[in-house]
Amino acid sequence: MEEGSHVWLRSPKSEWGWLPARIVKKTIIPRKNLKKVKADDNVETKNGNESNGDAADNGENDLRDEDDDGAVVELTLVDDFTGLGNEGQYYRRSANAPNNSSVKEGIKKTLTKSSGYGRQLSGYYADVEPFTQVIIVDNVGSNADGFGVGEHPDIKLRNMPASSSSALLYGGTAGGNSLQQKSKKEHSNDLTIDTGSHNPNGMIAYPPTLIQESITGGVDDLIGLTHLHEPAILHALRLRYDADIIYTSTGPILLAINPFKSMKGVYGRGLMELYRMQGETKITGKGGVSNTTPNPTSPRNGPTTPVKGSLTSPSNIVDLNLLSSSTILLTDDGDPIPALYLHRPDGKLPPHVYQTADDAYRAMMHGIEIDKFVKRGGSSRSLRPVSSKKSLGDKSNGGIADQFEIPTNQSILVSGESGAGKTVTTKIVLNYFAMLSRKLQEAMLNNDNVEDSRSSNTADSVANGGIVSPRSLIMGYGTNGATRRSRQNSCGDESSSLSGKDASIEQQVLQSNPILEAFGNARTMRNDNSSRFGKYINIAFSEKGQLLRASIDTYLLEKVRLIHQAKGERNFHIFYQLLQAASEEEREDLFLNDFTAKDFNMTNQSETYDRRDGIKDADMHKEMVDAMQVMKFGSETVRQLMRLIVAVLFAGNMTFSTNKSSSGVDSCALEETEASLAVAHLLGVSFDNLAASLTSKVIFVSGDIIHKGLDVGQAEKANEALIKSIYGAAFDFIAERINASICAGRGGVMNGSSDGSKGSSLLRRGVSEREQSIIPPGGASIGVLDIFGFETFETNNFEQLCINYTNETLQQQFNKFVFKMEQQEYEREGILWKFIPFPDNQDVLDLIAKPRSGILQILDEQCIVDWGTDRKFGLSLYQNCTKHNRFSVTSSQRVNNKFSIEHYAGYVEYTAENWLEKNKDQLPAASVELLESSDFELIGQIKKYVRSEGSKITTKSLGKQFSDSLKILRARIDSTMPHYVRCLKPNDDLAPDTFDPKNIVEQLRYCGVLEAVRVSRAGYPTRYPHDVFY
């Protein structure tokens, strides 16, 4: 940091925690004079302990004892908004850009959509008064002349526009009141840098940075920022969000900010086609829409980073400027594709979830081609990307063994907190894969000789280090294919009323969404369509790249929502959908009459009945029923499922009364009400059996069965257990029926049963036999993980521990992957590297799930013994875990049976109440007997999914079962090439055009992005492009 450096200064006066400033004076002060300076100037002393800096600083800049020898640095900072003005004034049109004024205006309109972000134009700094602040920092990291200052947690260098930072390159001088300015212009690709302007007060912008001013936020990939840290990330994301650009890359991560509004032109077939063509061109070097071949040395193309798995030169990209002149691509509404996607300074499309999906698909096809080549006797070593051949294969160059081989199978990991957009993002990914498969299928039908043309070229191309992706993906799909209109939703998928017999496998995979969402999603405080379970969708492709079949595994359905909903939240969608959409005949058959959601305890306790997003429950119910037909459920199965849902609703209205006895032992009775009579009829049991199962307990003693009466509180608990067991079993049944349909796919049923007899254990335990069985010989798969994000609430229970345990596991995998990619980057750049320690959270994972001593193991021990209680579980935790550095408990927490864990995202306090009941997750034996007596066909089908008390087969606890599933999930991901999508929620009010920086930075920390930045910058914190560095 030198005089003239533009910086971010941490400040509580800022709405988002940071203020733009500039260092105007820097003075070296002997440490012995420090006390006098403080007294005279009343300056502020900054050190690592006093700041709330990010974790990467670790307090390394603490001031040493003032009596020590040496010196400190006094920095004088003033407010400075250089480089933060309206982005439109920085836009410079290159001589190489299309000579079209309307194109220019379209781009400018896209880039300057916001009202600006300078002090006079933006609310972000509108209330900031001019300031001068003097800060003393330790002279850590000084250079040879003692005039350098290392990183500081409260002062971060800013990335300046080239027009501000280029002065240093052309004779700028530091420390003076005047600056030698040269009227000199430099062209970098199509970026014009004016070096003779924008240097206020004669201060140079140091250190220099080079960002593309025609790209909102400076770069599409934040890793490209010279200075990468919390305020730099926030600033870039805010600029892009204000311009309606919701996708931004950060190395291997795609950040997706939920706009909470319809994004015109951002999704649909036309845009899918652009990304498909770009992906094809990267692989084959051939475009699919124009006879004009882009010049790979054109300045417009510039240096690019190859897609993961690409084998060809990175310059083989679609020249969008040339493409647009010969092809008109429209959105699904008939409007032109936004200029943002058509005219780019480097010829590349901006980050998008379509790009992530396409990267995964191309990498998978690359792996398939390699496997085929190896089977014919070739070597996979010769097929590595040219950029990594030397570093990975040449051990004499300090490279490492072949541990960076790109796996054939891929995975896309979508994460984020509730309301961030995970479910929609997953739909978009699935739609893109369906589009690729549909186009391939159409081309195969229209081109009988496709296979012959492929086989004649494949061997030579692969042997030369290239890959031949199916030519049929680009054959016959030009303007007509891109503009063909059909009824679509916002994600670009076709609506269909086809029956299961006529539906394609692509349609079936897409139609699984409305079914699972109806039974597994709910409105929460943060989201109107929050997934209350995790799912892993494994999609199998043929060796030609055609989607064949899929399977879905689910994790940890939030069954506690059936019993309790917070204010402003709802139960699962299906209850409201059915009550809104039920026909008169259904109402009569199911005893609904004029009942609404306000009449049932399971739907009225939160006094919230609608959705804030405007979606009508009746419309969603119709969409769900249509999807069930596509998925071959059959009308009778659908009718029986609705009957079961109504039985659950009425069960929530059943009441119990106390019976006084002369012996002084009170018992209870099920009241014979409209609700209880309806439950008995709908479940296919007698009222007497229903009453007996809920008011008595079955005890197994030395082979004998004893029935013991329950009080009202215990009976209500038994009823809650019945409700949760029936609904959970129905959810597993539905998921397995979906699997029976999509696992069959093209070519008939693969290995294993399709009737669900084996599916329960596979689904719940996450066993991978089914995953392996759906992949055809020579094919591969892409898994899409839609998983719950890190959670911390006012009250955190067993469910939150499981969710956060999941995120800890995935975070460890993520850290290791980012670190591995970082090593590859060093080797590609020819940089000598040594082992760089990266953050490892294995100690947290051990605290939660280590055998014999982990929290889940201690919980299991309490569940096994008859005398186990939640209180004894808490005491056991205090006794066994207190010495663990990630576990903490205060005196007040001990009294309230609580404890805290330090996760990678911060401390979370948990309450240990009701953990034993939730971990057992078993239906009492009396209720199991009740279900055995039912004559309802669907009950007979779902019984196998019920976890029953007193079963002869030892049943794993829910915690153990979840832990085992997580290990299998981790093993799955480790065997794939992962692609990451981190969904972010800009505000908690679900409001459009509202960016809350503190909310964003918290999520960046929770989803591991800031941790990834820390790993990425552990070796080389500041990264200059060659043209700036030299």
Image (spheres, rainbow, N blue to C red):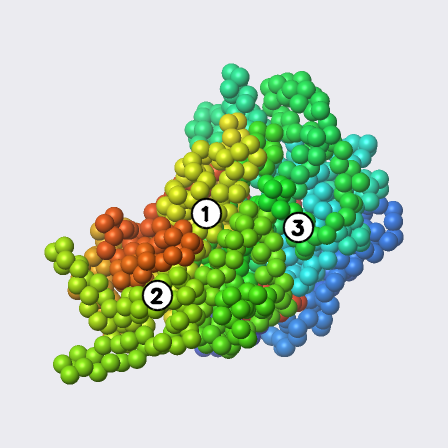
Residue at (57%, 35%) from the top-left corner? 746
Q: Position of residue 956 (x, y in %)?
A: 28, 51
Residue at (76%, 40%) from the top-left corner? 481
Q: Nearer the viewer, mark 2 or mark 3?
A: 2
Q: Nearer the viewer, mark 2 or mark 1?
A: 2
Q: Quadrant of residue 436?
A: top right
In primary-sequence order, the first of circles 2 and 3 is 3
Residue at (74%, 49%) from the top-left corner? 486
Q: Which residue is mark 3?
A: 497
Rendered view: 43 above or below 477: below
Q: Residue furthest left?
A: 702
Q: Position of residue 289 (x, y in %)?
A: 78, 36
The foreground one among 787 and 440 is: 440
Judge the density around disc 2: few (<14), some (14-19), many (≥20) Cα neighbours within 10 Å.
Answer: some
Q: Which residue is mark 1?
A: 736
In primary-sequence order, the first of circles 2 and 1 is 2
Q: Is any part of residue 633 visible from this angle?
A: yes
Screen quadrant of the C terminus: top right
Q: Which mark is residue 252?
A: none
The foreground one among 817 and 714 is: 714
Q: Secondary structure at mark 3?
A: loop
